[in-house]
Image: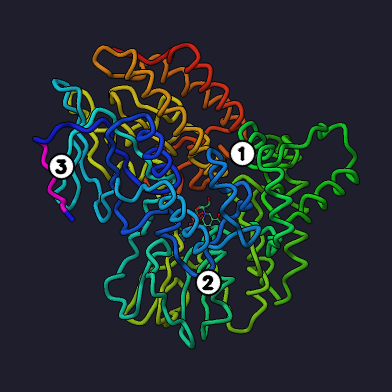
Amino acid sequence: MNTSVSASQTPLDAVVIGAGFAGLYALHRLREMGLNVQGFEAGSGVAGTWYWNRYPGARTDSASEVYQYWFSDALLKDWNWSERFPAQAETERYLNFVADRLDLRPMIRFNNRVTHAHWDAAANLWDVRTDQGASVRCRYLLSCLGPLSEPKVPPFEGHENFKGRFLHTSRWPKEGIDLSGKRVGVIGTGATGVQVIQTIASQVGELFVFQRTPTYAIAMRNTKLTDEDRAALRSRYTALGEWVKHSLAGFAFDMQRKAWADTTKAERRAIFEDLYADGSLVMWGGNFAEVLVDPVANEELSEFMREKMRARLTKPGVADKLIPTYGFGTRRPPLDCGYLEAFNRDNVHLIDIKAAPIERFTEAGIRTADAEYPLDIIVLATGFDAATGAINAIDIRGRDGVSLKSLWDRDITTAMGLQKHGFPNFFTSAAPLAPAAAFCNVPTCLQQQVEWITDCVAHVEQNGKEKVIEATQAFEDNWVKHHDQVTGATLIAKADSWWTGANIAGKPRRVLSYLHVGNYRKACDEVAAKAYEGFEIR
Ligand code: N01
């Protein structure tokens, strides 16, 4: 393949970075508009998150009927999901199916990681370069990097001495790893750790789970879908597609209509039981709004969840360590399929590294403050530098050579997560201060953002003399203020997790995600309806 596109060639209209849910759709939309577009993708294939995260047990916590593109009846008609909560391989296949159907592959340069994007103010063009030496110039630059693509690899002392295998979950090899009979350590018990642990517990010799913060686990109710199930779901696709757009978090459920104060404890218990029985994130996003803001309401729900978890644990002493004391839903609550039961097994050992922290990796394994654990494989399920990490990994410089990373190292602000003042014609999806950064069934929000961005590009193409658009500082400041008011009122703002950037040392703290998909959409639509009020077009 020719990778030496030179900067002297005719500038492109647009470059799209990333070939996951957002990137594929952006390529399609921009091409439909008649623009000359190039995609760049670091991986060798499409699918983004679902290309990279091939660790054992990876699957969505979103039901398949809302984890898809809505814009094409043909795609909706011809793709058959096999499970309510599809596994990684199936979701990756789906995105490959979409790429083939829309003939997107020829537009993408694979194995090219974008490293550099500098705004050339004299030419009104972005200068984009990759690690393979590709170099192009374009008018519009779209970041479609996904919210969770930059792995967090903590600097454990002595990790280079470890003689066994050591890997992050999001870099699991395609050919898999033979775990049979092995002594495996997993560090991290977020949504990823939960899936890995429950899946490999029965495959490995011994499993050592190094837990710093326990997690709530909602028992997932996964089912195989029959033809009848699929037909029934398909008949609701139009309604579902509309519902997710205006919901709290991009799923086909809404919060309870009744106020907490108007219900008795017994009524609430019955509602919790119903929500729990669904085995989905409705337990979080379909609950009472009060549990997100009122500590007393939150504690009642948290106690319900703890009771559910305790009932599944049989080994003495494990429940006390494995059941969280913080409030339910203030950190992302994963769905699980046998996570808790894995700890009932004799070959699974829970190591409390809050009580006795990891001191270092040794040649043989991990040494904590009170013991040494010989291991063959160490799996890091330690998460991601969310929303900003993947964008900051590129040297992005806007007007006057200002680096985006240098700004975000001080304060994480954006104009609705769609642009950043000082970076003309640079559009972001899954960036901070939009629901796509965290509080969303991601495909719902990425589609909305791609539609907004591409409509905006069409507007600028028609109305901009120089075809340049940039969010004003005042607009950005107002959005940041509004975002902080909305999210600052929640208990989430007080909790330490990737949702607040607290998982990355030195990351400025702010709730990364806007809360309420429907309200966000409305706000975006209003801006567009007023000819992109708050953005300067020239
Ligand atoms: O990452 P996380 P994740 N020493 O940040 C621990 C999505 N997702 O990859 O909390 C020891 O949640 C850390 O401990 P602590 C989903 O949105 C979706 O699991 O910092 N431990 C924590 O336990 C999810 O929320 C799906 O004390 C360290 C864990 O590592 C998001 O991805 C599946 C440590 C990291 O948890 C991220 O989930 C998977 C250290 N130095 C993921 N550093 C589905 O839809 C970190 N930890 C199913």
Judge whether 474 appears above or below 37 on screen.
Answer: above
> Pointer 3: what residue?
135
Query: Secondary structure beneath disc 1?
Result: loop
Judge whether 178 appears above or below 51 on screen.
Answer: below
Neighbours of disc 3 within 10 Å: few (<14), some (14-19), many (20+): many
Horizontal relation, residue 428 to residue 347: left or right: left
In this orientation, does residue 47 appear? yes
Neighbours of disc 1 within 10 Å: few (<14), some (14-19), many (20+): many
Kind of residue indicated by mark 3: Ser
Which residue reaches farthest left? 8
Judge whether 418 appears above or below 114 on screen.
Answer: above
| Gap between marks 1 and 2 measured at Cα | 31 Å
**Magenta range:** 2-7
Magenta: main secondary structure: loop
Q: Earlier in the sequence, mark 3 or mark 2?
A: 3
Horizontal relation, residue 116 to residue 181: left or right: left
Residue pictured at 44% horizontal, 37% vertical: 509
Q: Nearer the viewer, mark 3 or mark 1?
A: 3
Query: Secondary structure beneath disc 2?
Result: strand
Query: Secondary structure beneath disc 3?
Result: strand
Q: Residue 61 lies in what quarter of the image? A: bottom right
Residue pictured at 36% horizontal, 72% vertical: 166
Kind of residue indicated by mark 2: Val
Residue pictured at 73% horizontal, 37% vertical: 255
If the image is split into quadrants, where does the N terminus sit? bottom left
- Quick check: is 5 in the magenta stretch? yes
> Pointer 2: what residue?
209
| Gap between marks 3 and 2 measured at Cα | 45 Å
